């Protein structure tokens, strides 16, 4: 029995599907072991940082890397992103070495939690860590959308602690005691979390508590003396040499580091991480929100423009995605939406500045409180001022145009005919016809009118013009095809 073309095609598809399933069901051959991966954690720790660490750990496991080095220089970051990173480290199949570097760097706030969670903790000379007091934003709590940040005073302590080891230990900065129950819960939760990491890795738990409750900081030398870190290394080769041979607990089993002399591969963020990092930049998220709001409102004001609606819709969705992973004060978002709406309403229905001024105030206040007390996650004041100035000029321009339009004569509609001259198309007494602006109108005149005579429009009664002769004594019948000029 022969098979037709359709049967052969089905058999071929079945064979390809079977081969593909077999290939996917077989485990991939492990890559040849060796090498060390290096990634940088710089600036505020957010969703992009968490994604970068997660992908790097998976790559290190797939490639059989000997270790993953986190080179840290951060003032703090989001609590949720920090805990995600620590979860990945605690479940990692590859040893993670946290290294606060280069000289002058710091692992403040969220960086301290990552150092405590790592299998090996190291610092370069003239660096600092600590100041891990949590600060909840927008009603968030640790573990939610809050963030941990040392604040400006604590950040200065962290930076000051890195001025040099010869200066000795800095006194822990005494912060005020939590006043409210939510603050006490946040602090106690953070203390328990950091102490549990210290107990797991065998590091100083007393400093862990002081870093949270008192925003305490340590230099590199002090941190090693107190057992917060294991290594002080000025460069990467020195770090790997000192880490070599150390025994670490790796996902429930013991492992010995063999990293001395291994080649180091620096892992740069891929396009996805780079895009996420740009979108979650507070300034970019703020601009996307404004562009989206104004675009959609202008599209509603001028239906059919298309471009403002398309750009506005895309920008608004991207902005909302960024805001849902950032520590946002939603009262600020509501004020920004209200302000933009009032200013567009001023352009659509001028209220002599009432709507525009109210919208400008709402926009500025909402912009200021959108990312309250979040260094590294805020909107620059100069940008807010520029946006407010541009918006203020826009609504003042709309108000000026509206006032100017009110003083100008009517240039469209039937009311525009009042006061203009017309030409009688034939002799009439009482009711007849006149020609004005290329149109023939019914006209009513109290005096007889002869053909071609000029008349002036005095009023309108429905579709009938009330006219009166101009009485210039000129016969205009030869000029009948031409239109009367005002």
Image (cartoon, grey):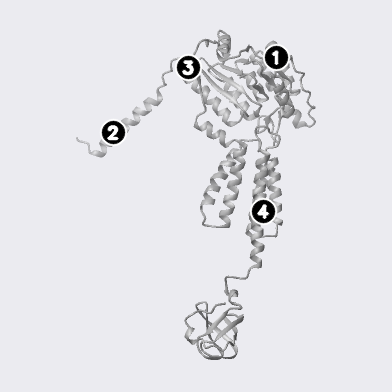
Q: Which label was assigned to residue 11?
A: 2
Q: Secondary structure at mark 1?
A: helix
Q: Which residue is mark 1?
A: 165
Residue appearing at x 70%, y 40% in the figure: 369
Q: Secondary structure at mark 3?
A: loop
Residue appearing at x 67%, y 63% in the figure: 403
| Above-or-below relation of 311 to 4 | below
Q: What is the crowding at mark 4: few (fewer than 14 residues within 10 Å), some, or many (at least 20)? A: many
Q: Secondary structure at mark 2?
A: helix
* Dot 1 or dot 3, earlier in sequence: 3
Residue 3: x percent and y percent? 22, 36
Q: Which label was assigned to residue 342?
A: 4
Residue 306: x percent and y percent? 51, 53
Residue depth check, mark 3 versus mark 2: number of the one nearer the observer:
3
Q: Which residue is mark 3?
A: 64
Residue appearing at x 51%, y 51% in the figure: 307
Q: CA gap, disc 1 to disc 2?
A: 74 Å
Residue depth check, mark 1 versus mark 4: number of the one nearer the observer:
1
| Above-or-below relation of 375 to 464 | above
State yes or no: discs 1 and 3 in contact (Cβ < 8 Å).
Answer: no
Q: Which residue reaches farthest left?
A: 1
Q: Which label was assigned to residue 109?
A: none
Q: CA gap, disc 2 to disc 4?
A: 65 Å
């Amino acid at each position: 029995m022969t098979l037709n073309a359709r049967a052969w095609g089905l058999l071929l598809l079945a064979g390809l599907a079977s081969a593909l399933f077999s290939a996917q069901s077989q485990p991939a051959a492990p890559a040849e072991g060796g090498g060390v991966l290096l990634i940088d954690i710089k600036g505020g720790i957010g969703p992009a940082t968490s994604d970068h660490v997660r992908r790097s750990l998976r790559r290190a496991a797939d490639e059989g890397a000997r270790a993953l080095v986190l080179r840290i220089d951060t003032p703090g970051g989001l609590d949720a992103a920090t805990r995600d990173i620590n979860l990945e480290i605690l479940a990692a199949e590859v040893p993670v070495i946290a290294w606060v570097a280069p000289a002058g760097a710091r692992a403040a706030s969220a960086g301290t939690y990552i150092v405590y969670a790592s299998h090996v903790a190291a610092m370069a000379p003239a660096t600092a860590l600590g100041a891990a007091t949590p600060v909840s934003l927008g009603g968030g709590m640790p573990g939610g959308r809050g963030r941990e940040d040392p604040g400006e005073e604590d950040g200065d302590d962290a930076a000051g602690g890195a001025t040099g080891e010869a200066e000795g230990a800095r006194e822990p900065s005494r912060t005020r005691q939590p006043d409210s129950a939510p603050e006490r819960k946040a602090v106690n939760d953070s203390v328990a979390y950091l102490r549990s990491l210290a107990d797991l890795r065998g590091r100083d738990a007393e400093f862990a508590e002081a870093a949270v409750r008192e925003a305490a900081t340590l230099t590199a030398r002090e941190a090693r003396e107190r057992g917060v870190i294991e290594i002080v290394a000025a460069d990467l080769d020195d770090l790997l040499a000192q880490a070599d041979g150390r025994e670490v607990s790796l996902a429930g089993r013991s492992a010995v580091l063999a990293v001395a002399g291994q080649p180091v591969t620096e892992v740069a963020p891929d396009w996805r991480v780079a895009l996420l990092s740009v979108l979650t930049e507070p300034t970019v998220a703020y601009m996307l929100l404004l562009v989206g709001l104004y675009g959609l409102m202008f599209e509603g004001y001028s239906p059919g423009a298309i471009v403002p609606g398309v750009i506005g819709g895309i920008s608004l969705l991207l902005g909302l995605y960024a805001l849902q992973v950032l520590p946002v004060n939603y009262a600020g978002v509501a004020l920004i939406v209200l302000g933009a709406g009032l200013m567009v309403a001023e352009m659509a229905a001028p209220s002599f500045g009432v709507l525009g001024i109210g919208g400008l105030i709402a926009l500025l206040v909402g912009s200021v409180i959108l990312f309250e007390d979040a260094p590294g996650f805020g909107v620059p004041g100069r940008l807010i001022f520029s946006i407010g100035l541009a918006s203020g000029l826009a609504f003042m321009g709309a108000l000026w145009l509206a006032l100017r339009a009110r003083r100008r004569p009517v240039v469209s509609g039937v009311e525009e005919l009042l006061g203009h001259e017309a030409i009688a198309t034939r002799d009439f007494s009482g009711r007849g016809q006149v020609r004005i602006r290329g149109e023939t109108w019914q006209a009513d005149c109290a005096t007889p009118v002869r053909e071609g005579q000029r008349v002036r429009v005095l009023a309108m009664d429905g579709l009938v013009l009330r006219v009166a002769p101009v009485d210039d004594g000129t016969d205009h019948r030869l000029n009948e095809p031409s239109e009367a000029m005002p």
